[in-house]
Amino acid sequence: MESISRLRAKLPDPMRRLADFAYNYWWSWTPDRVALFSAIDPGLWQCCRHNPVALLESVSHERLWQLAEDPHYLKRLYRLSHQLDCYLNEDNTWASRVAPMIPPEHPVAYFCIEFGIHESIPIYCGGLGVLAGGHLKSASDLGLPMVGIGLLYKQGYFRQWLNRSGWQEADYVDLDFSQLPMEKVCNEYGQPITVKVNIRQRLVKVQVWQIQVGRSVLYLLDTDLPENDAAARALTGRLYGGDLDTQMAQEVLLGIGGVRVLQALGIEPSIYHLNEVHAVFALLEIALQTREETGQSFEQIQALVRDLTVFTTHTPVPVGNVFSAELMTDFFAHYWPQLGLTREEFLALGARQPDQPWEPFSLVILALRLTRAANGVSRQHGHVSRQMWQALYPNRPVEAVPIGHITNGIHVRTWVAPLMADLYEDYLGRGWSTQLTNTELWNRVEEIPNEALWHRHSILKARLVAYTRDRVRQAREARGEADDDINAVGRLLDPQVLTIGFARRFSAYKRSDLIFRDLQRMSRILAHSKRPIQIILAGKAHPDDHQGKRIIQRLMEWSRHPDLRDRVAFIEDYDLYTTKLMVQGVDLWLNTCRRTFEASGTSGQKAALNGVLNLSVQSGWWCEGYQAGINGWEIGEALPDDRERQDAVDAESLYTLLERDIARLYYSRDRAGLSRGWLRMMKASIRTITPRFNTDRMVAEYVTQMYLPQPTEPPEPVLASVIA
Ligand SMILES: *Cc1c(COP(=O)(O)O)cnc(C)c1O
């Protein structure tokens, strides 16, 4: 705990506790989060991407002492300190009562290739990482002992900017680890703990960092050590940044290295949860360790490995996640003898037909064979997964394929706008955020006065408009655009206009170009004289995804049209912070993904929590969340395999809904200027969606259905031990 002590020593005496907040991301989901750090220096806070360690390292001593004599600030700090102590020390938690067999000495080990905890630590790309972050946070809130295992990427995920022709460019910036809220993990003599992993027949040394996420600890593996050669050092350079070979190397590092790190730390997990296939090589290492301990054959060990492991699949397509037998041999030739297997037996573990081990090696198949339980991430995705993998279970009907589902959720305390949380506090009652799954509590949303809800939402919307203008101005300045164009941001967006938010990864299956399938029609809809609509866009395409980049470029071209230039805005470099402002500030959240290709999706849940309505195709979570005529809209209908016609039908439906239903409803106002119909749907959306689509419910289901040896019904309501 060297870094935190160093920071503490630098702070004025009355302010020392700030170091504890800076080094525990718990601060980022407390209701008082806005004031704690940003009050120190709002400008600096923004410059350092809301990273409290960087802020406290660079703010002047004079400023810190100024606050140290401000009784209001100190009171707030002491109240929060007390809350943090209570939070960390609470031992009568939901999980301690429901799952006493998962004690702190034997936590759940949760493996994932990306973690989206906060914008200040950019080691995530999208939904998978954000889900993993929410999982750690809710585990902490429910009192479930959990450690995360991931990789620490020197350059994180790339930073996006658009050049003058609207083409996406990628910047890679080295993170300064010493300025991030994390500690290098050391042994009792202060020596960094390291492990060695054989990667492509070369030993790579790995060190470990730890990040505190409430009570959960996230361990991140890092190969950037002087003892390693350049290629090995670059292994943890970038998230999703390499060719197949690098991908394989990173996955070996995560899976095998991750299990070794746990061993080196003396952590014996109750259960290993492999979140998506990137981590499944962990299964081999668990087998190897078990073999070394017991001396049993691989055949006998399999059952032991299965007892300890569960697997979550996120991929709704059967392609991908396979490696050639050659590549497997390159990486594992030293490994199968240690497991007591021949090459054929080893390769058969990932083969669809065990007697044809020369097929590509499938990570999903390996995971399905060697874990105790597997799940998809929505009801629909569970079904799709059972169909996809039925061939592995030749004598079973689809419904008996052993892949269940647990629908993804969002960490509500992270995503709720403080202004909305305050309203929920008033009308749902104190402690509302400790019992998120209590539907009766959420029914009280109906009691929120229309004026109050509309007013708060209007503030959040105006805030988003201001933020968007700032970001677009910065982007135009960076591109060196003409002064007239830069100043035009003053006219960009209107807080009175119905606002659509559309933010996602730009990959083909998200069908981000569906909205401008008929450009003229969409333009007419946006520029309507009485019922105008505006749209805020954001999202990255993978640096190698030409098609995705082309979609962004077309959006940019389109947004420059004179009729649209004030109505369409693109925010560059989508991240957790931009998501937050968008899902809190728009009126309508749009999702046009190709059906069933999005396993769950979660951004629409963040929107619903904040009173934003969803307009989405029936895919993933929306199949479970949507109630016709009550809490949002459904785009189009599923057609048998005919993509061209499907796109046409969905686009037509989207345009019609916007023109005929959505804009009319939004703009039909009462004397006070409120849209009662819209407000009714806002309330219904909050009330019907939030109690179910949150990570408290999700983690509780993982506990009772996956982590406990026998699936059980939860014996008591889900309660979070958060200080409300
Ligand atoms: C929530 C979130 C996602 C997930 O969005 P979906 O499109 O619903 O899968 C992706 N990226 C970021 C930054 C998010 O916050």
Image (cartoon, rainbow, N blue to C red):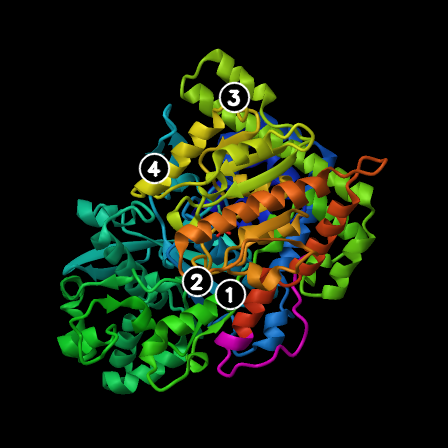
Q: Amino acid at mark 3?
A: Pro
Which circle's residue, 3 or 1, is located before the other in the chain?
A: 1
Asked if disc 2 and disc 4 are in contact, CB closer than 8 Å, the reply is no
Looking at the rendered structure, the secondary structure element under dot 1 is: loop
Instruction: State yes or no: residue 42 in magenta.
Output: no
Left or right: where does residue 689 sit relative to residue 249?
right
Looking at the rendered structure, the secondary structure element under dot 2 is: loop
Front residue of this view, candidates 640 and 65: 640
Looking at the rendered structure, the secondary structure element under dot 4 is: loop
Q: Which residue is mark 3?
A: 562
| Residue 308 image point, x, y percent | 40, 77
> Disc 3 or disc 2, which is closer to the eye?
2
Q: Amino acid at mark 1?
A: Ser
Q: Which residues are magenta?
A: 704-723
Which circle's residue, 1 or 4, is located before the other in the chain?
A: 4
Q: Can you tell which mark lies on residue 640?
A: 2
**Distance from the alpha carbon under mark 2 to that under mark 1:** 21 Å
Front residue of this view, candidates 177 and 700: 700
**Is 456 rendered above or below residue 711?**
above
Q: Which residue is mark 4?
A: 174
Left or right: where does residue 46 sit relative to residue 123?
right
Which circle's residue, 2 or 1, is located before the other in the chain?
A: 1
Which circle's residue, 3 or 2, is located before the other in the chain?
A: 3
Which circle's residue, 4 or 3, is located before the other in the chain?
A: 4
The residue carrying pointer 4 sits among few (fewer than 14), some (14 to 19) or many (20 or more) residues within 10 Å by Cα, namely few
Left or right: where does residue 475 sit relative to residue 468?
left
